Every structure is written in structure tokens, then in C-alpha cells.
């Protein structure tokens, strides 16, 4: 397994997530993360967490691809997949459209539309949750260490 310093060095050479897959294993497609706000809340049911939020058809489809059950504006995930804090619900659930190679089978580029939010700028400003092994998190560390 590569060290953090080795990954930072590799990140300098990568310009696209698809070049980085061997390092991240499509981590962004194996988790769903909800930032809980005043207009959303979570209920613990017997075997599920119910997340109440306003859903667009696209977001409902996205959550269903991660194994969620959708009813109206409620998203249900199995309890064993969830980690809950006061402000975040994190769900470990691999997207059903993810190929064994870590590519998106629904998009001709192999990179899902959701990934367009992952950029160096969003890593820097915190507007998106950047998964721990994301290329842009490493690129940000490259800048922070003064070498990039």
C-alpha cells in the first residue's frame, strides 16, 4: 500500500479521476453522505433509517442506485449501512451502476455526473464532501505542503 507522501506525489501527475481509480477504488460511488439541515431529519425505525428531505427525480434515482428504498420524500437505508452524527448521515452502499473496474456503467465517460462536483476548488472551499482517498483531496494536500 502506498504511503500518503507517495499518493501526494502521484496526485501531482493525475489530471482526472479516471486516472486515479487504482488509488481510490471509486470511493465516492460507495458512500452516500447527507448533511442534515433544518428541512431534513432522520428517524430510526426497526431496521432502517428514514431520511426526510426534498427529493428531485435525479436525487431519488441516485439514492435508489445506492440501495435505498424511496417513498415520497423519504429515503430508507438499512441500519447496518449507516453512521449517524448530529449533522451527518453517512451510508456505506456501493452504487449498483459501478462496474468491477470502478467505472460508471450509466455514463459514456465512465465518470458519473455526481463527480463533476469534485474539483480542486470544491476540495478547497468545502462545498462538497470529498472522500478520504479522492484525487482532489490529495491535490489539495500537495498545495498545502508547498510543493504544488
Image (cartoon, rainbow, N blue to C red):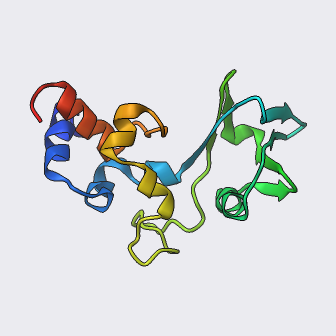
Number of marks drawn: 0
Q: Residue furthest bottom?
A: 108
Q: Nearer the viewer, residue 107 or 3?
A: 107
Rendered residue at 79%/49% (across/down)? 75
Q: Is residue 133 visible?
A: no
Q: Is residue 144 above or below residue 7?
A: above
Query: Where residue 67 sits: x, y (%)?
Result: 70, 57
Q: Quadrant of residue 87?
A: top right
Rendered residue at 65%/56% (across/down)? 66
Query: Where residue 52 sits: x, y (%)?
Result: 82, 42
Query: Where residue 78 sits: x, y (%)?
Result: 77, 45
Q: Nearer the viewer, residue 101 or 130?
A: 130
Q: Nearer the viewer, residue 121 or 145?
A: 121
Query: Where residue 134 sits: x, y (%)?
Result: 36, 44
In which quadrant is the N terminus drawn?
A: top left
Rendered residue at 28%/54% (across/down)? 20
Q: Is residue 20 above or below residue 90?
A: below
Q: Nearer the viewer, residue 53 or 96?
A: 53
In which quadrant is the C terminus drawn?
A: top left
Q: Would residue 22 be found to the left or right of residue 93 on screen?
A: left
Q: Would residue 105 be found to the left or right of residue 37 on screen?
A: left
Q: Would residue 72 be found to the left or right of residue 123 on screen?
A: right
Rendered residue at 42%/67% (across/down)? 103
Q: Quadrant of residue 45?
A: top right
Q: Is residue 44 visible?
A: yes
Amino acid at each position: 500500500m502506498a504511503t500518503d507522501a507517495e499518493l501526494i506525489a502521484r496526485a501531482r501527475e493525475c489530471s482526472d479521476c479516471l486516472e486515479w481509480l487504482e488509488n481510490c477504488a471509486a470511493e465516492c460511488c460507495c458512500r452516500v453522505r447527507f448533511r442534515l439541515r433544518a428541512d431534513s431529519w432522520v428517524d430510526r425505525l426497526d431496521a432502517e433509517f428514514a431520511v426526510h428531505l426534498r427529493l428531485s427525480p435525479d436525487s431519488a434515482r441516485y439514492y435508489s442506485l445506492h440501495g435505498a428504498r424511496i417513498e415520497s420524500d423519504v429515503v430508507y437505508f438499512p441500519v447496518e449501512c449507516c453512521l449517524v452524527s448530529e449533522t451527518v448521515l453517512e451510508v456505506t452502499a456501493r452504487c449498483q451502476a459501478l462496474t468491477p473496474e470502478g467505472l460508471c456503467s450509466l455514463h459514456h465517460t465512465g465518470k458519473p455526473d455526481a463527480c463533476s462536483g469534485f474539483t480542486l476548488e470544491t476540495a478547497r472551499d468545502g462545498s462538497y464532501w470529498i472522500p478520504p482517498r479522492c484525487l482532489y483531496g490529495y491535490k489539495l494536500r500537495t498545495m498545502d505542503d508547498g510543493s504544488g
